[in-house]
Image (cartoon, rainbow, N blue to C red):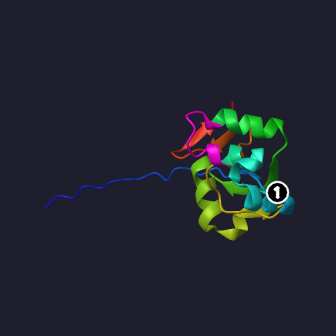
Amino acid sequence: MSYTICIVRKKEVVMNKYKLFQIHLTDAEYNKVNAEGHDSVEKHMTKLDMSFSDDPGALAKKAFDNAWYTHVSNITADSIEKVFEVGNIGPEENIERLAPMFSVSVGDVVEDPSGKQFVCASFGWKAVA
């Protein structure tokens, strides 16, 4: 009888703090959208357009340039993909809430520890251009 022994090395996981930015409407902006339609508030339309754009990074830059994003939390994770997971299902102890926060979704921006920013796209993440 022979045996095969496999030695598996555990990959070291490095946790980092990522900043999460989201676009939030004011009560007045919600009222305007409800009264006049989605295209009546430019920042709302910009966020909606990110779902269908070939270049959501450019739209996210426009939103940053117009100060439409709010830094809503810091999320501790080992990768930007894990930021999405933690921002949707936790664990809550990995989220430092700074302002009201929705679950992470299309149009949200994550800034990594080096300062690079990525927008959550319909499929994956795109650099904020």
Dominant secondary-structure state across the stretch colored magenta: loop
Please name the residue shown 63% across and 54% down the image: 83
Amino acid type, mark 1: Glu
Task: Give the magenta part as a residue range.
Answer: 48-56
Q: Nearer the viewer, residue 106 or 112?
A: 106
Marks counted in the figure total 1
Please name the residue shown 80% across and 62% down the image: 31
Residue 98: x percent and y percent? 84, 61
In this orientation, does residue 129 appear?
yes
Residue at mark 1? 29
Please name the residue shown 74% across and 62% down the image: 34
The N terminus lies in quadrant? bottom left
The C terminus lies in quadrant? top right
The quadrant in which residue 72 appears is bottom right
Residue 41: x percent and y percent? 77, 49
In the image, farthest residue toward the front: 36
Residue 128: x percent and y percent? 68, 35
- Determine whether, in the image, residue 10 is placed left or right of residue 7: right
Please name the residue shown 64% across and 50% down the image: 14
In the image, farthest residue toward the left: 1
Residue 96 in the magenta stretch? The answer is: no
Secondary element at tag 1 = helix
Q: Nearer the viewer, residue 79 or 1?
A: 79
